[in-house]
Image: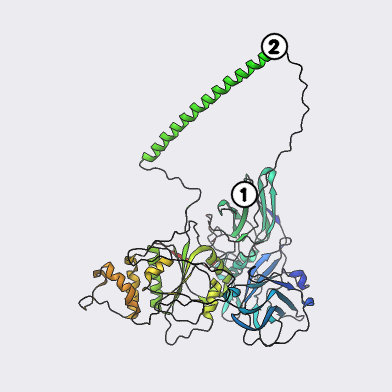
Amino acid sequence: MHSILPLRLLWLISAVSATQLLDIGCSSKPHVIGCRFVRSSDIPLTSPSIDWGHFAPEDVGIFDLIKPNVTTGALALESKIRWKVPIGQLPHELLGFQVTITERTGENRKTYTYLAKLNRSIHRVNNAVQQADFFLKLNGLFKFGNNYDLKISFYPPGSGGIAKTEKIIPPWLEKTDCDLRYSLKKHRVKRSRQITPRDMATLWSTSFQAIELYPARSSVNVTFATAPAELCINSYIVRLKSDATGQVLVTRGVEAEPNMFIWQLFENLPFGMPFIVEVVPAVNKDGYCPCSNCNCVTTSSKAFELAEVKAKAPIPREPLQVAHSTPGDSLWLFALILLAAIVAALMILIAIVIFYHRKILKTEEHLKLTLAQEAPKFPSLKEKRIKAVLIIARNKTHIEKYMCDKLARALANSGARVRYEEWEHMQVEENIFQWIAMVLRDVDSILLVHGQKAPDYQLSPGSDNRLLSMIKPTDPRLVHASWGHYRTDSPYIETVFNLPRHAPLLCAALCCKFIAEQWKPVLKACEERLKLPRIGMDSELVPIDAVDESEDAALLGEQCSTEIEVVDEEQVLEVESPIVEEREQDFDTADSGSVDSCQMDTILVRPPPVPVPAPATTQCPQTPVQADSAYASLNTYEIHA
């Protein structure tokens, strides 16, 4: 049930002053450090000049959402500027950060300056402190078709300690003919990238205008904004979920015109249960997906619940005056009590007989269902589900890509739920929030497979550091593996599993069974890569089918390490006074058969919500205000046994 309210959609409002447009926030781990932003007028003009050397803010990124105003429907860009602190001994104590944003286009160019003051100064940055992720949240500052220069510097200011970047925002789309979807005009951004209406639709997120509760009627009315006409979004999926269990209670498909506020009414809801509402663009009736790779943004509301309406207390009445009793009245009272006792005994007897009779009927019915040839399966209220293992393949050659595919299928056949993704650095850099949200929500273990470096391949400095900073380098779910011992300058890699030499240990770390038969394709691919034949007892070539499982298990431990130096020592990262305690995991390993010492979680995590007619079972891990962190995830595909 929904109704369409006409609304005139306005363009992005112009910047009048920074304090009127900016919703400023600074994020970091609360138990590590915190910060607060002040306006430019409150920043001290003089401060001692120091030399920061080569230290400067790193991993600077800018991420956007297109959101409508809840009152007028005007479109605005919600942006987040994120950065980190480099690891090492700083030459001077760090008191905060200074963020300067300067317009590059237009005649009346403006500059916005903000200062983030830390709750305590920092002298040395270790792994735990670097997990503090600072970001400045801006609503409506950046405008379509404008360019900006950004500078993030250490405070107090001095020589060095500055990170610079630029922000280029494409112009808003021209009038789009949604009937010619495959010939939509493309808007160029820089030289090597083009943006289409589908790319704009991937950044669009709705806003909830109102969520009205009616406890007396046990119903909730939700009002949200639809997309502009240029994005060609005509269908939406509205889900009502339980915030406690994540179960989807109601799913509705809504067809709505653009530039409108529409509402949905949910009735007959239970009291005392927390609810959240999710809205995501869906595939249109003609099968056209409005977003790039169908990665539309899912918007979640705040949690709410219906309070039960209690009736008013009854008005006390004055007691009646009882007349004085006579001897005859006592006999009548005794007779009434005796009659009431007899009636009560009869009622209890009838209840016992009915209960026993119903119990017999239920037992007979249960026996009939059990003895039937095709007994119906009764689904449980809480479906047992497991999380997945995410495999990230950093391959350098075609054969390594083939080997990673065999590795993923071996783990899938061993009982693990595998999600496989070929590493595309630029794609993940452009969608970092979506990628991190998918990893933190959907996977139980992260297997990072390193390819062997070619002689002419030079690893760019800090690329591994940037990759691991996306996943959190101290995450206990992170597991490293390589085709041969992988040497790197990264300080985060503590243990590297050599594939397939450490196959049983790797299976134990990923909480799945080690089945030697499933690892034969991996061993064969490794032999093709190293160009090594298999040698039998009589020093002749022996086919792989002629070797028994015990000999094959031995080959798993030695065959693929003849060309590369093997180092089994763990590289332990020494952290000075870590603030976050690391969880230790002990894995029991076995030399034969299988390893099954881990109990997997019983909650199924599927890929992020993709707009399809059927209801999805995933949930957002956070409940932000108006989809503050509702960033869509990248597409990965599952490998089934």
N-terminal of the pair, mark 1 or mark 2, is: 1
SS under mark 1 = loop
Is label 1 in contact with label 2 (beta carbons under 8 Å)?
no
Residue 464 visible, this angle: yes
Q: Residue 464: image x %, image y %? A: 51, 78
The crowding category of the residue bearing disc 2, from other C-alpha atoms within 10 Å (few below 14, some 14 to 19, many at least 20), is: few
Q: Amino acid at mark 2?
A: Gly
What residue is pinned by disc 2?
328
Residue kind at label 1, given as amino acid type: Met
- Pick out the residue farthest to the top: 328
Dot 1, crowdedness within 10 Å: few (<14), some or many (≥20)?
Answer: some
Residue 9 shown left or right of residue 515 in the figure: right
Residue tagged by mark 1? 273
- Asked if 633 appears above or below 528 in the picture, the reply is above
Percent across and percent down for residue 600 are: 45, 59
Q: In the displayed structure, does residue 323 sit left or right of residue 340?
A: right
Q: Is residue 89 above or below residue 28?
A: below
On screen, 163 above or below 211?
below
Identify the element where label 2 is drawn.
helix
The quadrant in which the C terminus is found is bottom left
Residue 186 appears in the rendering? no
